């Protein structure tokens, strides 16, 4: 009931459910499934909304895809993708954004060309900003890869590189290389207390100091 209620001259729309595309007049090639999905759409075209109130507020935006309960609920922009319950529900404007997971996207409201990746509870795991910079543990990445926290990299042979405070070390800015058995081969960094790297390996040890 109420699906495509206000439709005038539009075509190629698909509406399945109650009050779907209710105010649509001339928007075409939209697909909506779920109560109130694309409810406010009037002239927007080529949108896809699946889930309760998905893309509810969109009126003129085009090429949006929303999958999940309230996904992109308040959006009025174009070319956005929201997948997950509440994905992008706090975004009212902005174009070309991608939100995966249960994140409301409040931190990028009004911005464009961002990608947010979160878990189902909305906890952000990483993002890519409009400069193409990826941030892990930070919402303001300043380089192609910006990580706030320790990094571990393993090789096929079993060697490991740690960047950051490796386990048990009372220092900072440390990079440690190990062999496949876990023995340290080399450390790079600065000890905060003894003036040398803690637990240096058998082959080489390097540390940096600075004057204030």
Image: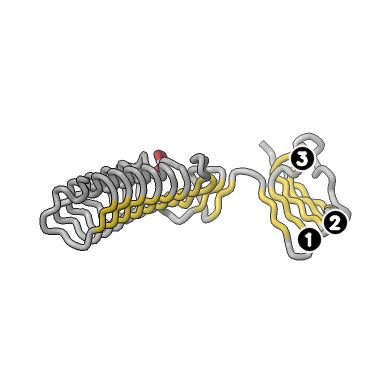
Q: Residues within 10 Å of mark 2 (few under 14, many from 20)?
A: few
Query: Looking at the image, which residue sits at the far bottom?
Result: 156
Residue at 52% across / 45% down in the picture?
Answer: 119
Inter-mark Cα distance, 2 to 3? 24 Å
Give the color scheme: rainbow, by chain, secondary structure or one colour: secondary structure
Which residue is labeled 1 in the image? 158
Q: Nearer the viewer, residue 101 or 211?
A: 101
- Which circle marks residue 191 in the picture? 3
Find out whether the residues at labels 1 and 2 contact each other: C-beta distance under 8 Å: yes
- Asked which quadrant contains residue 87, the reply is top left
- List x then y, in percent, for residue 125: 54, 46
Q: Residues within 10 Å of mark 3 (few under 14, many from 20)?
A: some
N-terminal label among 1 and 2: 1
N-terminal label among 2 and 3: 2
Residue at 35% across / 54% down in the picture?
Answer: 65
Which residue is labeled 2 in the image? 181
Determine whether, in the image, residue 22 is placed left or right of residue 113: left
Inter-mark Cα distance, 1 to 2? 7 Å
Q: Looking at the image, is mark 3 or mark 1 nearer the viewer?
A: 1
- Asked which quadrant contains residue 195, the reply is top right
Determine whether, in the image, residue 34 is placed left or right of residue 107: left
Q: Secondary structure at mark 2?
A: loop
Count of marks, rendered view: 3
Q: Is residue 93 visible?
A: no
Relative to residue 103, is residue 61 depicted above or below? below
């Amino acid at each position: 009931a109420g699906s495509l209620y206000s439709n005038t001259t539009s075509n190629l729309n698909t509406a399945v459910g109650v009050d779907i595309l209710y105010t649509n007049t001339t928007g075409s090639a939209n697909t909506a499934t779920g109560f109130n999905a694309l409810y406010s759409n009037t002239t927007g075209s080529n949108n896809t909304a699946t889930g309760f109130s998905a893309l509810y507020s969109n009126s003129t935006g085009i090429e949006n895809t929303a999958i999940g309960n309230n996904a992109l609920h308040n959006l009025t922009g174009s070319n956005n993708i929201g997948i997950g319950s509440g994905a992008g529900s706090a975004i009212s404007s902005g174009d070309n954004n991608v939100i995966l997971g249960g994140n409301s996207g409040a931190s990028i409201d009004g911005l464009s060309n961002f990608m947010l990746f979160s878990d189902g509870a909305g906890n952000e795991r990483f993002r890519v900003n409009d400069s193409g910079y990826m941030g892990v543990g930070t919402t303001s990445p300043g380089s192609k890869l910006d990580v706030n926290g320790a990094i571990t990299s393993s090789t096929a042979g079993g060697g490991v590189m740690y960047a950051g405070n490796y386990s048990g070390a009372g220092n900072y800015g440390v990079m440690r290389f190990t062999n496949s058995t876990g023995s340290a081969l080399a450390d790079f960094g600065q000890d905060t207390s003894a003036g040398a790297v803690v637990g240096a390996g058998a082959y080489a040890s390097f540390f940096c100091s600075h004057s204030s």
